[in-house]
Image: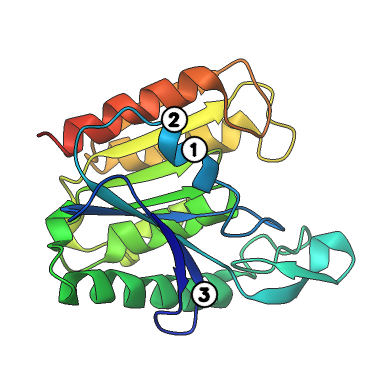
Amino acid sequence: MVDTLKPSALECLRRETAANPTASVIWLHGLGADATDFEPLVPMLDISASVRFIFPNAPIRPVTINGGAEMRAWYDIDPGAPLAGGADIRDSAEAIKSIIESEIAAGISSERITLAGFSQGGVIALELGLSFNRPLAGIMALSTYLHDHEQVTERIALENVDTPIFMAHGLSDPVIPITRAITSREALIALNYRVQWQEYAMGHQVCPQQITDISQWLSSIYPD
């Protein structure tokens, strides 16, 4: 089942693996992509639970690192000021929070909602997942990093200290070096977060083995 809807101010693509979903995955795309980017992966995932996948569209904005060109982006990236996107990140997290609240209002408990994201989308998934004031099922951070990791303790909420986190990264990622992801992973582990780390012989992308690993991880947090 595929349809589009507009919760809050974000347009979304929705895909359900079966009727009467009992869980939700909100999956955020990367810079310059859109809601259709990861929707084709849904039928490739081997999960038994009935899950609603929600793919939001980021707003269109000028992006400094791309010469000010306008594209879908969760936040601006300025290579000369790596922390300058903080306000955009907070705004995007608030927009995704509205989608979580819509799912809760529709009958899906927060403990059955996962935040997922690739690259820029993963930054938002981590930012919101760590600070959300209700327990979530999990956080999936693909080819991404933790924004302003040195100050993360000022932004986290106790409700998700035990939430499982799946992090995956390509060994030869030319966009976000794996060292940046490892630094983020270590910052989370130092705070006693439960991080499952996977790395693959790939660049800034998703590979078949990663899809298998995602399936297994989702099945572990959404058992029958």
Say above or below: 58 vs 17: below
Marks 2/1: CA distance?
5 Å
- Amino acid found under the numbered disc labelled 2: Met
Answer whether residue 3 is visible to the viewer in this image. Answer: yes
Q: Which mark is residue 93?
A: none
- Amino acid found under the numbered disc labelled 1: Leu
State the SS at label 3. loop
Q: Which residue is mark 1?
A: 41
Identified at 66% across, 40% down, the residue is 176
**Which residue occupies the foreground of this view, 157 or 54?**
54
Mark 1 closeness class: few <14, some 14–19, many ≥20 residues within 10 Å: few
CB contact under 8 Å: marks 2 and 1: yes
Mark 3 closeness class: few <14, some 14–19, many ≥20 residues within 10 Å: some
Q: Which residue is mark 2?
A: 44
Which image quadrant is residue 21 in?
bottom left
**Which residue occupies the foreground of this view, 20 or 159?**
20
**Which residue occupies the foreground of this view, 186 or 202?**
202
Sequence-wise, which precedes: disc 1 or disc 3? Answer: 3
- Amino acid found under the numbered disc labelled 3: Glu
The location of residue 190, given as percent across then percent down, is: 29, 38
Position of the C terminus by quadrant: top left
The location of residue 112, given as percent across then percent down, is: 17, 53
Mark 2 closeness class: few <14, some 14–19, many ≥20 residues within 10 Å: few
**Horizontal side of residue 189 vs 202, given as left or right:** left
Marks 1/3: CA distance?
19 Å
**Horizontal side of residue 111 vs 128, given as left or right:** left
Q: Residue furthest bottom?
A: 9
